[in-house]
Image (tube, rainbow, N blue to C red):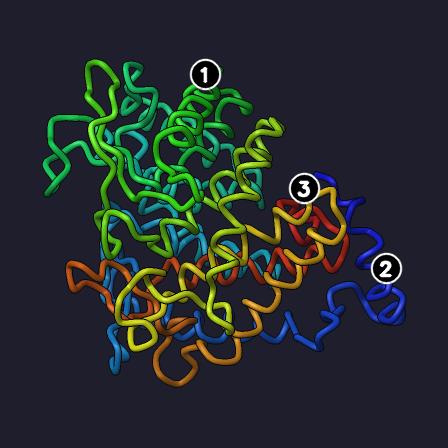
Amino acid sequence: MKLQILGAFFVTILMVNCGKKKSEVKAETGFDIDAQLAYCVEQTSKAVKLVPADGNIPRNIAPDSKTWRYVDYKDWTSGFWPGELWYLYEFTNEIGWEQTADKFTQYLKPLSVTPALDHDLGFQVHNSFGNGYRLTGNPEYKDVILKTADTLATLFNPNVGTILSWPRDVPNMEWPQHNTIMDNMINLEMLFWASKNGGNKALYDMAVSHADVTMENQFRPDYTSYHVVIYDKDTGEKIKAVTHQGYSDSSMWARGQSWAIYGYTMVYRETKDPKYLDFAHKVTQVYLDRLPEDLIPYWDFDSPDIPNTTRDASAAAVVASAILELATFTEDEATAKMYMDKGEKMLVELSANYQSKDANTALLLHSTGHAPAGSEIDYSIIYGDYYYVEALLRLKKLKMGMPILAPLHKN
């Protein structure tokens, strides 16, 4: 990671704060990162006490409600809650958070030994067991990740070159043809990790193939993304590009573009191939260029109801986290500083105007899940919370001159 590129940018901060412990360093704007993380600890402490029974995992809270809807380990969002708990353990370094994170992480263990339900195994297992292993080195966690990566690999279709997203009949997906959704880019991280940590080296090649085929087929000339591409499962021929959760087949669905930004930044980190860095810049720029003034996107950039439609705080949190990492890879100092500034301002806005506070025990309000289906519109949603904490931790580490994936504390 090219942290030296940002060294000059942070030297003023470190000089001004030289009398403080590193963990107390604040952003130039006066944004108190630790205060926001302490808020996350307080809110999540309340939420943990509400979980009704073993196996229940928080997913969302409806507007004007204080009640979580719970899911089990099979739900695609099941990894975000234990992942959030691991991040809070990372921040606090308190054994109680480690124990709580482990408890909820263990619920997902069956995913490593059962056939793949869909592509979301990376979201589920890398966010939970992956963060747990990064922070503790527990060999049991590593074993689960490696087994799950092999399970995810069973969805790879060599005729197409991508991982099948939904191995079942979904409306407009031409089943049994091969569908790939933009969200799937995030799951590549587990394949890369496994290939470098004792798993099959072929997992790396699968991840690269998926990134390449997606880059070729799932973007328009202006670098906005299609949510879904359908391929002929036998020939690999592209059949059509459509949306499932966006406004239309030709629109830029906010969270879909956020997955592209996060995904290609991560693929560059794992491969160091400059074509992915270049592409990450391009898919990021079109997103940034079209943001409203407060930097929090409407659920779809092309919704005809703007500005009288819902926002998506979860997309903002994903992008904030992604562009903070992208800044560390960016050689042009002005562009790197722009990414840092934008990422920080997104977090400032989310913290000032989107925190749940007394409304409920989630972290953020105003995320949008699946607007066309009328599902999770203007909700608190667990993945928004997960990426919000992740982005805060990344910003904190960058202000401290640390790599963003390094554990905050050395135990």
Question: Image quadrant of residue 360?
Answer: bottom left
In the rendered structure, the answer to whether residue 275 lies left or right of residue 27 reads left
The circle drawn on residue 329 is 3
What residue type is disc 2 on? Val
- Between circles 2 and 1, the one closer to the viewer is 2
- Which residue occupies the extreme front position in the image? 221
> Residue 11, which numbered label?
2
Instruction: Name the one closer to the observer, 59 or 250.
Output: 250
Residue located at (57% from left, 44% from top): 281
Q: Residue tagged by mark 1?
A: 200
Asked which secondary structure carries label 2, the reply is: helix
State which tag comes first along the sequence, 2 or 1. 2
Judge from the rendering whether residue 267 lies leftward or rightward of residue 1; answer left or right.
left
Task: Please give the name of the residue rendered at 55% of the width and 32% of the height, measured from the top-left corner.
Answer: 276
Asked if residue 45 shows in the view, the reply is yes
Gap in angstroms between the C-alphas marked 2 and 1:
42 Å
Observer-side mark, 3 or 2, equals: 3
* Residue 357 placement (x, y as % from top left): 43, 82
Among numbered discs 1 and 3, the one appearing first in the sequence: 1
Which kind of residue does numbered mark 1 sit on?
Asn
Residue 350 x %, y %: 49, 72
Residue 70: quadrant of the picture: bottom left
- Give me the residue at 50% from left, 68% from top: 295
Judge whether 391 appears above or below 43 on screen. above
Q: Note whether residue 98 is visible.
A: no
